[in-house]
Image (cartoon, grey):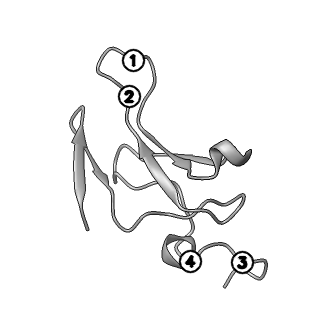
Amino acid sequence: MSLLTEFGIKIQTQPRPYCRECGGQMYLRIPKPDADWQAFWGCSEYKAGCGGSRNIDPHTGEPEHHAQEWTQGVTSDGD
C-alpha cells in the first residue's frame, strides 16, 4: 500500500480502484494548492466519455468503494 499526504490527509494510492461505471482503472487527480477542489479518483476512460469518479474519504484516505471493486473490476453479478 502506498500513501500520499495532501492537506494532512493520508490518501491510499495502491491498489488503484476500478470505475463503477465502465470497469476502467482509476487515477488519482490532485489539485494545485490554490484550487477550489479536493483530490479524487477519476476514470482513465474520461476522454472516451466515461464520467466515473470517486471522492476520497477524509478519515480513511480510501476512495468510496465496495470491497470487491478494488482489484477485480466491476462485473454484472458483483463477483
Decide which of 59, 63 is in the foreground and name it: 63
- Looking at the rendered structure, the kind of residue marked 4 is Gln
Q: Secondary structure at mark 3?
A: loop
Decide which of 17, 47 is in the foreground and name it: 47
| Residue bearing the label numbered 1 | 35
Q: Secondary structure at mark 1?
A: loop
Q: Looking at the image, which residue is at 78% across and 77% down?
A: 76
Q: CA distance from mark 3 to mark 4?
A: 10 Å
Residue 68 image label: 4
- Looking at the rendered structure, the kind of residue marked 3 is Thr
CB atoms at circles 2 and 3 under 8 Å apart? no
- Looking at the rendered structure, the kind of residue marked 2 is Pro
Label 3: few (<14), some (14–19) or many (≥20) C-alpha neighbours in 10 Å = few
Outermost residue, right side: 76
Q: CA distance from mark 1 to mark 4?
A: 32 Å
| Residue bearing the label numbered 3 | 75
CB atoms at circles 1 and 2 under 8 Å apart? yes
Q: Looking at the image, which residue is at 33% across and 23% down?
A: 32
Q: Secondary structure at mark 4?
A: loop
Q: CA distance from mark 1 to mark 2?
A: 6 Å
Left or right: 66 in relation to 10? right
